[in-house]
Image (cartoon, rainbow, N blue to C red):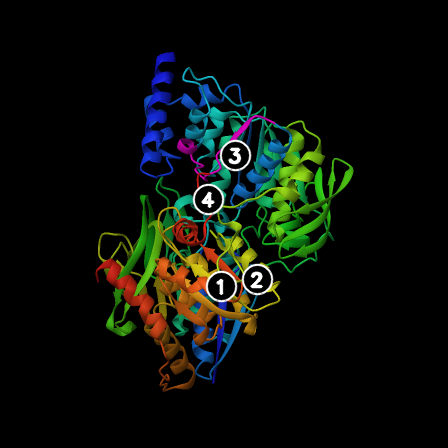
Amino acid sequence: MELKICHMYPDVLNLYGDGGNIISLSRRLRWRGIGAEITKLPIGSSASLADFDLVFIGGGQDFEQQVLLEDLHRGKDREIRAAIADGLPFLTICGGYQMLGHYYETYDGKRCDFIGALDLYTKGSQRRMIGNYAFRCGEEAGGSVVVGFENHSGKTWLGRGVQPLGRVLAGFGNNGEDGTEGVHYKNVFGSYSHGPMLPKNPAFCDRLLSVALERKYGRCELEPLDDAAEIAAHDEMCARLGV
Amino acid sequence: MKLKVILAILLGRAVRLVSRLVHRGGTDMPGRLALKLCPELLSVLAKDVKSVAITGTNGKTTSARMIEQAFSDLGLNYMANRSGANLISGVTTEFLMNATLSGRPRKDYAVIECDEAAAAGVFRQLKPRVVVVTNLFRDQLDRYGEVTHTLSNIRRALRDVPEAVLCLNADCSLTASLAGDLPNRIAWYGVNEGAVPSRPVPELSDATHCIRCQTAYEYRYVTYGHLGGFRCPKCGYARPTPDYAVTAVTAQRADGSELVLDARGQSYEARVNLPALYNVYNAAGAVAAVSEMGFAPEHAIRALASFRCGFGRMEQFGLGRAGARMMLVKNPAGCDQVLEFLQEIREPFVLVACLNDRAADGRDISWIWDAHFELLSQLGRRLERIVVSGDRAADLAVRVKYAGVPAERIREQRDYEALVRELENEELPIFLMPTYTAMLELRQAVIRKVGGSEFWE
C-alpha cells in the first residue's frame, strides 16, 4: 500500500511549521509499513490532482497572496473544485483553508475573490485571534480533541452547504463568535490550526490517513502505534487550556 | 524640560539601585519609568554620543560584541546595552546610567543593539551614525508578524535617520531592499560566490519571490537560508556588490573560522573567535560598521579574533568533564545553523534542548517544525542522547521523535537544578540549546553550580 501525497504551494504556503503535517503523515504511514510518496507542487507547476490520494495546503503570508491567486486562476481552481467533488481528501490550514472559500474581504472593504470550492467566506477584522486553542471534531471527523495554535485576523463564516470541522473548546476558531472551528465537506478538512496540526493530534492524523486509504483501497484498519510522546504533548496542552 | 530630564534620570537611577539591591538586573525598568516622566529623554541623553545601532533578526548581540571589542581595543570611551535589553526602555536605561544628573553623557560612543520592532522608536531619538541591519528571517510570528512586516518596521525606523550610514547585508534580498527608497549612504557587506560551498536553494525560504515585482528569484549560489547571490529575472533587482566582502572561508572549526575579507579593495586575513557561518556574516557586518565609524578596518579585524560573546552565544562553561557550550536559538534559521554546527562535531556528545513559549520566546512554538531537526538523526551514535527540557519539553520530544532520533536516546528533564546535577558528572562534551527565557533560567542554574557572570555584567 502507498499514499501519494501532494503538498500544494510549499514555496509560498509554508507559514510556521506547516511542513510538520507532511512529516507527520509520511512518518505515520511508514511506521506501519505503508509507502508515502510526497510530491511538491510549487507555483507554476502543472500536475493533475487526480493522480494523488491526499492533498495538503498550508498557510501563507499576505505578501505572496497575489502570486498565488494568479496561479490559481490559471486553471488550478477548476482542478481543485473537481477533485473535491470527486472525494479527494484535503487538509488545508489557515490561508489554504480560506482560499477554498468564496472570497476574503479586508477590514477596509476590499474584496479578493477566492476559488469558491467550499461554501464559506472570510472577513478581515481588526483584532488578531491568536494563541493556543482546542476544539472537538465532529463525529464524522472522528470526534477527537485537537489542540493547536491559531493566528489569524480573518473571521470565517460557514454557509449552509458545509459542516464545521469541530466545536471550539478554548480559543477563537473560525470567528470567535459562533463556536465553530474549521470546515468539513466531503473529504476536505480545513482548520485554523496553523501550528502543525497533525504531530500532536495523532488521532486526527490517523483519521485523515484512514479516509485516504479507504478511498484508495476500500476497507482499512490502521495498526496502532506507540503514541505516548504525542499524547503527552497533546494532554499537556489540554490541561493548560483547561479542556 | 531641564528639570524633567533631571527628575527622570534620578528616578531611573533610584530604580536601578533598588533592582540591584534585590539582585535583579534592572536593565529595563529604570528606562521604562524614566521615559514615562520624560518621553524624549533618550534624545537628550544621546545627542552628543556617536552611536552604532545594530538591528535585524539574527546576530545582533554577536555583532555588537565584535564592534564593542574593536572600540575597547581602540581605547574609546563607550557604552553598550550588553544585557540584551534592546527595547527603547533598555537603551534608555543604558544611557541614563552613563550620564550626569544634568543629562550630559559620560561616554563618547555607544554600541546599541535594537529589537526590530522597537527600532522606529529608538532610532528617532538615538540618531545613530551607523546602522547595521544583519538579516531578516521568519521570527516569532506572534510578536513580529510576517517578515515583510518587520521589514517595513525597519524601513520606517531608517526614514528618521537619513544621515546615518547603513551597513546592509547584500546577500539578504529582504535587507538589501531597504536601500531602494532611502537617501542614506550604503555600505554593503556579504559573502562572495565561492567563499563557501554553495547549497541548493532551501525548500523553505523566507524570500522566494522578488520583493519588488514578485517574480521567483534566481540564485548563482546560496550560503544559507535565503542568503546568497540572488537576482530577479524580471525587474533586475539583484544582490549588490559588497564593499566589505568575505572572499574565502579557509577554515571552519568548532572553535572558530578563518577567512579572507576584502574591505573597500584591501584584503585582510581574519580569524573569527566563534564557529558557524552566520558568525562569518556577523564578522563582515562588524568590520563594515567599525570602518564606517571612521576607524581603519584592521581594528575590527583584530577584534574578531579576541572578542568574547558570552550570554548564551556559544558561551562556554566548565560543566561536565569535557565542558559545555550554550547556543541560544530563537527561530528556525538560527536553530538550523546550530544543528549544522553540530554536524561538524566529530566525537560523541550530549545535547540539551530547552523550549519555552513565554512572551520573549514567542508564544507559538510551531517553528520547531521548520527547523531541520532531521539533521540530528544523521549524527547516528555521535548523538549520545538528547535531553529535552523547558515549558514545552513534550513538544520538543515529539519533534525529535519525528526527526528520526531513536526513542531510547530521548530523555525529558524539566528541573534545571536536577539537570545540571546530572550533567556535572558527564564525560562527554555538552551542548545546550535553549530558547531565550529558557537560556536565562538554565544559565542561572549552570552558573550557580560552576560559576560565570551575571547577565548584566
For the residues tagged 3 and 4, is the chain the same?
Answer: yes
Gap between marks 3 and 4, in whole Å? 36 Å
Which label's residue is closer to the chain start, 4 or 2? 2
Q: Which residue is mark 3?
A: B155
Crowd around label 3: few <14 · some 14–19 · many ≥20 (10 Å): some
Tell which tag, 4 or 2, sits nearer the viewer: 4
Q: Amino acid at mark 3?
A: Arg
Which label's residue is closer to the chain start, 3 or 4? 3
Give the SS element for disc 2: helix
Which label's residue is closer to the chain start, 1 or 3? 3
Q: Which residue is mark 2?
A: B342
Asked if residue B444 lies in the magenta stretch, the reply is no
In the image, residue A129 sits, relative to residue A115, either above or below, namely: above
Nearest the eye: B154 or B126? B126
Q: Residue reaching furthest right?
A: B266
Magenta part of the chain: B76-90
Q: Which residue is mark 4?
A: B453
Instruction: Name the dominant secondary structure of the magenta segment.
Output: loop
